[in-house]
Every structure is written in C-alpha cells, then in structure tokens.
Image: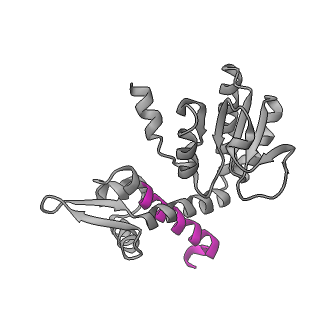
Amino acid sequence: MANGETKTEAGSADTEITLGVLDAVDSNASVTQRSMAKELGIALGLANSYLKRCVRKGWIKVNQAPPNRYAYYLTPKGFAEKSRLTAEYLSSSFTFFRRARGECEDALAHCVQHEWRRVALVGRSELAEIAALCNSEFGLDLVLVDADGEETRFFGLPVVPSLDDAGAIDAALVTDLGRPQAAYESLADRLDPHRIFTASVLKVRRDKADKAMAS
C-alpha cells in the first residue's frame, strides 16, 4: 500500500468513511455532498464516490426535489449495514474502550445519583463488559439481557433472555453493538426514555426521548 499503509488500516478507513456517509444521510436527508465531505474531512470527489457506491449497493435512495437539489434516504438495507459497520468499527477502534468507559461511568453515576439501583444491560458485547467492569466502583445491581445467549452468567452478572425475565428494572443501558437502534426502540416502549442510556458511539436516534423532553 502507498506510504506504508497496511491493508488493515485501509479497511478501517473504508469502514469509517462508509459509516460516516450512512450516518450523515440518516441524520439529515437534505445533506449535501459538500457538507458531507467537510464533516468527514475528506475530498469532495471521495465523498461523491462513496455516496455513489452506497446508492449502487442499495443502502441509500436518492430523490430529486427542486431542480439541482437531492434528498438522500437510508433504505432498510442501509439501516442494517449501518448497524453492522457500527459494530465492526467500534470493536476495532483504538478509542472505543476509552470513550465507552467514560460514558458507562457517567451513566452508572447518574443511576446512583437518582437511586436507580437495578439496571439492565441490553445486549452481550464489549460494551457490556466495560459497563460490568465499571460497576465495581458503583455497586449497582446489574443484569444482562441477552436473547441469543445460553450462559447464565456474564462477568459475574446474571443473564436473562428478555426484559420480562429481569424483574423490576429502574434503568437500562443499551449495550447491543449489532442492533443498538432496535434495542433502544424496544426499551423505549417499556421504560421512560430518560432512564435509558445510549452511548454516543452507538449513534442511536432518541426521537422519543427528545419529544418527551420538549413536552
């Protein structure tokens, strides 16, 4: 590779740019290629190339609005790919542990402050491991919700297949790296969104929580 760039580094950059494009479209349907390039810190031509590739793969749909203006939308395939790339990127990112630890500590401290003692971690992942490790400092009663797992313990925590099996829950932390948005939306139907914590690295859209805060 040029300038000593490894295959791993190139793959990481490709994942990060693709994820950035999908996230930019998900956040703002009227985003322009120029603003996208600026946000991602890449050349306009490169942003155009990645956007076209996402369209070809069926992840993004383009609609022409007024003349010379376009609206971009994520397709169901695009949402699925965004979730997959988020998990891939976070698992390999050198900054993941540091950022995730800080946000887990903030979430658990918030629970302690509000006397929310029993907290569910929703999704078995590296993020759940970090939250479990952070809890040694807070002493909350954590339980892991893992619909696909067979083990009954995880880092010393009890494991249940669903939120119904977790008993009374005061709050929840989304730790599902594969489908964080779906995990959040499922929780939001059961808990006050203000009691649901989503690390910023997961890029979860908290529409229900935003509406509740505005009301």
User: Is 51 in front, or is 157?
Assistant: 157
**What residue is drawn where x is 40% and y is 70%?**
50
User: Is 1 in front, or is 14?
Assistant: 14
User: Is 99 in front, or is 60?
Assistant: 60
Q: Is residue 131 visible?
A: no
User: What scheme was used to colour the molecule?
Assistant: one colour
Location of the N terminus (image quadrant): bottom right
x, y (%) of residue 148?
72, 59
Q: Is residue 180 above or below residue 18?
A: above
**What residue is drawn where x is 70% and y is 31%?**
108
Stretch of the chain drawn in magenta: 1-23
Q: Is residue 19 left or right of residue 136?
A: left
Looking at the rendered structure, the number of numbered marks drawn on it comes to 0
Q: Is residue 184 above or below residue 115?
A: below
Q: Which quarter of the figure has residue 118?
A: top right
Does residue 6 belong to the magenta stretch? yes
Q: Is residue 22 left or right of residue 174?
A: left
x, y (%) of residue 63?
24, 64
Q: Is residue 81 visible?
A: yes
Q: Residue furthest left?
A: 67
**What residue is drawn where x is 70% and y is 20%?**
115
**What is the chief secondary structure element of the magenta stretch?**
helix
Does residue 210 belong to the magenta stretch? no
Location of the C terminus (image quadrant): top left
Q: Residue furthest front?
A: 164
x, y (%) of residue 73?
34, 60
Q: Is residue 59 above or below residue 203?
A: below
